[in-house]
Each structure stands twice: as structure tokens, then as C-alpha cells.
Amino acid sequence: MRLLLDTHIFLWYIVGDKRIGALARATIENADSVYVSVATLWEATTKYRLGKLALPEPPHPWLATQREEHGFVSLVIDEASVAHLPSLELYHRDPFDRILICQAIEHDLHVVTVDPIIGKYPVKLLPTA
């Protein structure tokens, strides 16, 4: 299984937050590949800079280092993914989530999230309980 972690899941995973259930954690650990979008690092850095996200260290290079240490693959924002944006319904207005949805569609990835709105899109979800 190939997974794409939503921003909150990536952050919870790297700090060992218990909001990720044991089954979801095991699925992440045993996945064929786990991706973290560049949009996730962008979102976390933006929220950190605005004072809306506390991190144990400044986001750069800490987030990239954590991604690498956990064996997650960096997923670039590519033109083929962006091409899905015009066809997405406006259920979700968050631009970071919208690009993650596009990447999941384009690259056939299961999204790991607790965000129920993402489930309204034609993506495969991995439960986090």
C-alpha cells in the first residue's frame, strides 16, 4: 500500500502522538511507501511562522530531517497533480488539503487523515483509529 500523510498525521506520527491508533501506525510502518508532500512542509512552516503551530525545533531543517529519519518519501507538487484542481468540488477550501487530494488522485495514494471532508473526494482513505 502506498500512503500520503495529511499534515496533522505526519506531525502526530513524528512526535509519537497517541491520536494515531495502533492499527494506523502499524499500517504506516508496514506500507510499501509513505509520502509526505512538499505542501505539508509548506503548510507546517507557514503555521509555525504565524504562531499557530508549536514545533520542538524550527521547521527547517527539522521537518525534512524527521521525514528522512522515518523513511518517508518527499512528494513534489507536479503539474499533473495540479491539473486536477479545476475538477475538484469546493467541499474543501484549504489549499494545502486540496493539493494533497490532487496528489493522491494523480499518484493513486491512500490518504491518511482524520479530516472527514477529504472523504468527499474520489480518494482512498486509511482510517486512523
Image (cartoon, rainbow, N blue to C red):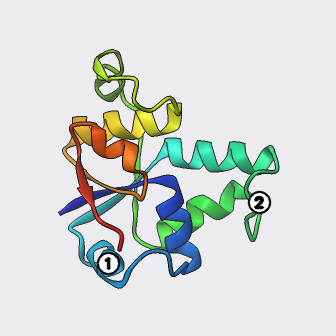
Residues packed near mark 1 inside 10 Å, few (<14), some (14 to 19) or many (20 plus): some
Q: Residue at x 24, y 70 (%)?
A: 31
Say the numbered circle drawn on residue 69: none
Circle count: 2
Q: Is residue 116 above or below residue 62?
A: above
Q: Position of residue 91 (x, y in %)?
A: 39, 30
Does residue 129 lie above or below 110 as drawn?
below
Amino acid found under the numbered disc labelled 2 = Pro
Q: Residues within 10 Å of mark 2 (few under 14, many from 20)?
A: few
* Left or right: 126, with 60 as reference point: left
Where residue 20 appears, as percent x and y from the top left, is 44, 75
Give residue 90's quadrant in the image. Answer: top left
127 or 39: nearer the eye?
A: 127
Residue 29 got which mark? 1
Amino acid on which the number 1 mark rests in the picture? Glu
Would residue 103 appear left or right of 59 to someone viewing this image?
Answer: left
- The quarter of the picture where the C terminus appears is bottom left
Name the residue: 42% across, 33% down: 98
Q: Secondary structure at mark 2?
A: loop
Task: Give the mark nearest the N terminus, 2 or 1.
Answer: 1
Question: Quick one: quadrant of the N terminus?
Answer: bottom left
- Residue occupying image coordinates x 40% and y 40%: 100
Asked if 99 appears above or below 79 in the picture, the reply is below
Residue found at x 76% / y 62%? 54
Return the x and y of residue 68 as percentages of the image width and height: 48, 66
Apparent side of residue 46 relative to residue 101 in the rendered image (left or right): right
- Tag 2 and tag 1, C-beta contact below 8 Å: no
| Residue that label 2 marks | 58
